Amino acid sequence: MMQFALSSQIPPTNQQSNRSENLLDSDRLRRQADRNLYAVVRQNHIPRAVQDSAHASFLETPVGIATLLLARCVVPPQRPSDREHEHLLKALNKHWDVSVHLLSGTLEKIVAEDQDDAAAGSGEDGGSEVLYGRAGFLYALLYLRKTITKAKEKACFDLLDEDRKKDMDRITRDSSLKTVVDGLVRRGRAGARRWRSRAMAGDADTQPDSLPPLMWRWHGKEYVGGAHGVLGILQMILSCPRGVIEEHLEDFSAAVQWVVDIQDQDGNWPTKAPSPSGHNLRRPGPQANDLIQWCHGAPGAVILLSMVLTRSSSPHGLFNFNPDFISRVKDAIRRGADLIYERGLLRKGLGICHGVAGSVYSLISASNALDSSRDTPYLKKAVHLAQLASLAEHLVKDGEMGTPDRPWSLYEGLSGMCCAWTDVLDCAGKVAENKVERASGMPGYDDLL
């Protein structure tokens, strides 16, 4: 994933003589990514079905491998670099059918599970989060949809045979996205009813309009953060086309307002949804919210609210918030981003999930939302934090930073930071050239628009 992400950001080397020497040449990165993808497919094989929709995400299940393989087959290189690469691409293409079957089967499993839940009246609200569940599967569909758009721009989508075009249309069409979104909304409403009932039983003075219309659980707890909670699920849903989510916009709007309401006085967000019993959620008091990382805390909220701000303005126009609330959203982003910059050189390492890369990506998101072409305070903060991350080896030796369990991985280790460094450089280059373009975003999460 890192190599695919980097190859899309780094321009190809023009001079043929330099390509063999340049480790960051985009063609070389893409070729190495193809080798690694094929090695993973050969070693692990792509199954024909997922266990259930709670284990169907892009990041942590075979759905991610199948998605990358299909994306690679949709946008092949115009000219393979050598005979070995040509054979490799043909080998990847042999796994097209099983990859399509896995994604199509997951959609069918979601429909079947929702029908079973409705028949049983269970009001299921779990299995929805980004890291493992349904929202993570929604990312996979959106990633493929974005890939198809790029393929059409490059005029290579037409090179697919008609059966493969139909496969892609069936998986990524609006009705498929809506199947996943509607299921997430049903589960979110069931979770909100359960949470509201518990709140009213605990405190008769609790006002129903202070509670969100959507709430999901993971392992029995109502998490807030990007990995397992409300922020991540909303991030995926609100990345969908307007036509897919339009009928639920009132609920999404209220959920976004709740997210702004629960920011604490330090600018952070709680790990779990604060209990509605005993205090007014509209005015949260000081709380011990010590985690400031993408999976739990301010980074996930800043990324979500930055996207909401982007999609509230033309030409996206998803929400129609009043100016006072837009000011509150901007203030929430500023306070969260300032806190991330202050405390974002995390001790857990360089990765995206609970490391410095996640902090950098949230500051890039704040820059997208708040910076102007002439004034870029949050991009400067992202650059500075990324520069400090280059000192990680010394920090580890001095005991100031730990080594994660998977030190080379995308979400725990150095691969995630390599992507963040590349995006920071790309953003800085665009500013220098007076280009107003959105950064590509966090791979596997915020790189869809």
Image: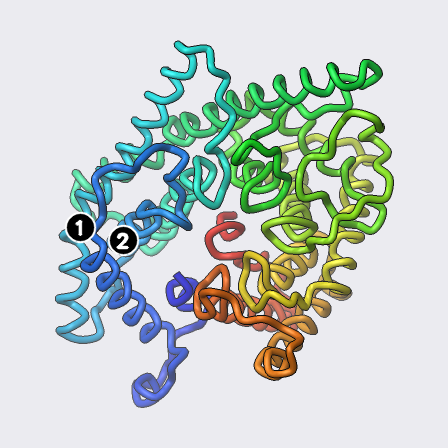
- Percent of width and height locating residue 441: 54, 56
Q: Residue 438 carries which label?
A: none
Front residue of this view, candidates 286 and 446? 286
Front residue of this view, candidates 206 and 38? 206
Badges 1 and 2: C-beta atoms under 8 Å apart?
yes
Position above or below: 125 against 390: above
Residue placed under numbered mark 2 in the picture: 69
* SS under mark 1: loop
- Percent of width and height locating residue 87: 13, 66
Q: Can residue 149 be seen in this view?
A: no
Q: Earlier in the sequence, mark 1 or mark 2?
A: 2
Which residue shows up at 72% across the image and 70% down it? 380
Where residue 106 sits, quadrant-wise, is top left
* SS under mark 2: helix
Amino acid type of the residue that numbered disc 1 sits on in the rendered structure: His
* Mark 1 vs mark 2, CA separation in Å: 8 Å
Is 147 placed left or right of 360 in the picture? left
Q: Residue 95 carries which label?
A: 1
Front residue of this view, candidates 357 and 378? 357
- Percent of width and height locating residue 444: 46, 52
Position above or below: 228 against 254: below
Is 111 placed left or right of 325 in the picture? left
Position above or below: 375 against 95: below
